Image: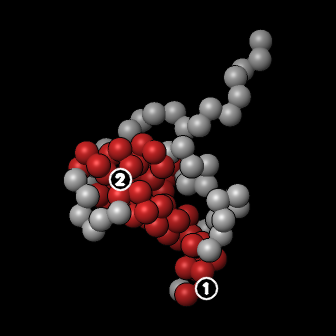
Amino acid sequence: MGELLSDVLLAGRDSGPPSGCAARALLCAAAFVDQVQCAEPAVAESVRALGRLRQDPRLSPEALEALAAGLGVEAPRQARRVEATASA
């Protein structure tokens, strides 16, 4: 467990998404706690934090949805970071 924590939490923002479901869930939870900075955030604050976290390409939408479900809130359905516009 300590190795997983180290691998996930010490990786820089430039690193890609971690491999493995547990690592992705851990990164998502740690990013959420970093955003809200409290043990029991209000529902509105949780929703705002989840919306901001959708912009992080390292966080999987599935992990964010699972976190939202665990918190009992609905994650905002905004689009992830726009990568490129469609060429026509």
Residue placed under numbered mark 1 in the picture: 3
Say which of 3 and 22 sits in front: 3
Asked whether, in this view, residue 8 is left or right of residue 51, the answer is: right
Q: Nearer the viewer, residue 6 or 61?
A: 6
Residue positioned 35% across, 53% down in the render: 68
Percent position (x, y) of residue 85? 70, 23
Q: Residue furthest front?
A: 37
How far across and down, in percent of the image, does residue 51 sit?
A: 42, 43
Q: Earlier along the polypeptide chain: callout 1 or callout 2?
A: 1
Report which quarter residue 23 is drawn in.
Answer: bottom right
Residue identified by numbered label 2: 68
Q: Amino acid at mark 2?
A: Ala
On screen, residue 70 above or below 74: below
Q: Is residue 68 visible?
A: yes
The residue shown at (77%, 12%) is 88
**Residue at horizontal 66 percent and vertical 65 percent from the top:** 12
Going by the picture, which residue comes out furthest to the bottom?
2
